[in-house]
Amino acid sequence: MVAGIVPRAAVPRLLRAGSRCWRRRLWAPSGEAAAAAALSSGARSPFDRQLKRKQKNWAAARADRGRCDCDYLRLEVGGRVADRVFDVARAFPLALDVGCGKGYIARYLNKETVEKLVQVDIAQNALKTPMETEIPTVSIVADEEFLPFRENTFELVVSSLSLHWVNDLPRAFREIHQVLKPDGVFIGAMFGGDTLYELRCSLQLAELEREGGFSPHVSPFTAVSDLGHLLGRAGFNTLTVDTDEIQVNYPGIFELMEDLQGMGESNCSWNRKPLLHRETMLAAAAIYQEMYGNNDGSVPATFQVYYMIGWKFHESQARPAQRADHQKSAGRSIASNC
């Protein structure tokens, strides 16, 4: 079934009371509204979400015109997230894909596992050109930080390579936990801290050499040691967090940066430097080749991916066994003798 942007009447029971996303062409509070919410909560906003929407819309429109095929990385990670969904031995009547893009996870799922899928993304152009899937889908333009759904709605929430751009990751995790039903599961993937370390180092060294200082050109990423803590604070239990690295070879630094732009992964930090001097870019290309280049002349780019699984509590879930009284007494005796 081809996904489309649907009217309110199609999914009336999913929305929160008073949600504003439907009154403005399905947009959840974003842009100025999201910035105001962040300021009122005292949170810092490292990313320009309006710019990120423009970048993703531009990338989707460019791919739709056949000018760039840069979906290879999203497809690979989307398939790995789908594999983790299949590892859960149950069917999900209703699932949510947060930051779905063109449907990189939905492409690999089947009706036996997910009966219906709601797809949410900040970029409208991505939802206009979805990939084929056998699952009935509903597509909604909304911000990942402000999910417009009622509590206890979905049995499954998935997300792939989107949450590293949210300004308030703890809030995003709380939103996901809130819309999950008890005993529901969240399965996600996001870029990790070592992503594009070759590009980051090359640009910094080139700027130091040519301009006497440097500014960030690769967006900051969350550390893996923080993920479990953030998921636990959001209310998830039975957590699993693991890491993986995907290395892609490119002809050079310019081809890498062109593909990042085609993926919608250009830097959108507020403190980014808007332009790089030509001499600095040429120096960065030479440094990249010298420090990391392969024997065949290509250069590698490393993408570190964090995979996470968390469950919403339910009474039926297994819990750690209570220690027997004699074990507790023995423990106190050992402690008193130390």
Image (spheres, rainbow, N blue to C red):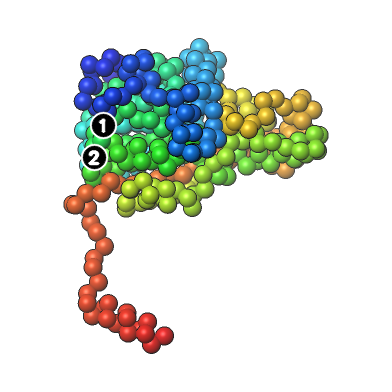
**Residue at 24% in and 65% down:** 321
Look at label 2 and name its amino acid: Lys
**Residue at 25% in and 49% down:** 313
**Place of residue 95 in the rendered image (x, y in percent of width and height, measured from the top left):** 28, 32
Whichever of labels 2 and 1 marks the residue nearer the N terminus, that label is: 1
Q: Secondary structure at mark 1?
A: loop
Q: Is residue 281 above or below residue 44?
A: above
**Place of residue 250 in the rendered image (x, y in percent of width and height, measured from the top left):** 63, 32
Q: Is residue 68 above or below residue 326?
A: above
**Residue at 38% in and 20% down:** 27
Q: Secondary structure at mark 2?
A: strand
Image quarter (top left, top right, bottom left or bottom right) of the N terminus: top left
**Place of residue 310 in the rendered image (x, y in percent of width and height, measured from the top left):** 34, 47
Q: Quadrant of residue 265?
A: top right
Q: Label 1: how many residues lie within 10 Å, few (<14), some (14-19) or many (20+)? A: some
Front residue (pair 203, 30): 30
Q: Label 2: how many residues lie within 10 Å, few (<14), some (14-19) or many (20+)? A: some
Whether residue 114 is visible: no
22 relative position to 255: left or right? left
User: In the orientation shown, which residue stands out farthest toward the front?
Assistant: 40
Mark whose residue sits in front, 2 or 1: 1
Front residue (pair 170, 258): 170
Residue annotated with mark 1:
150
Kindly report the distance in space between the C-alpha atoms of the residues bearing marks 2 and 1: 10 Å
User: In the orientation shown, which residue stands out farthest toward the top?
Assistant: 65
Residue annotated with mark 2:
181
Front residue (pair 299, 313): 313
User: In the drawing, what numbered circle is on residue 270?
Assistant: none
User: In the orientation shown, which residue stands out farthest toward the bottom?
Assistant: 337
Whether residue 68 is visible: yes
Image quarter (top left, top right, bottom left or bottom right) of the C terminus: bottom left
Look at label 1 and name its amino acid: Arg
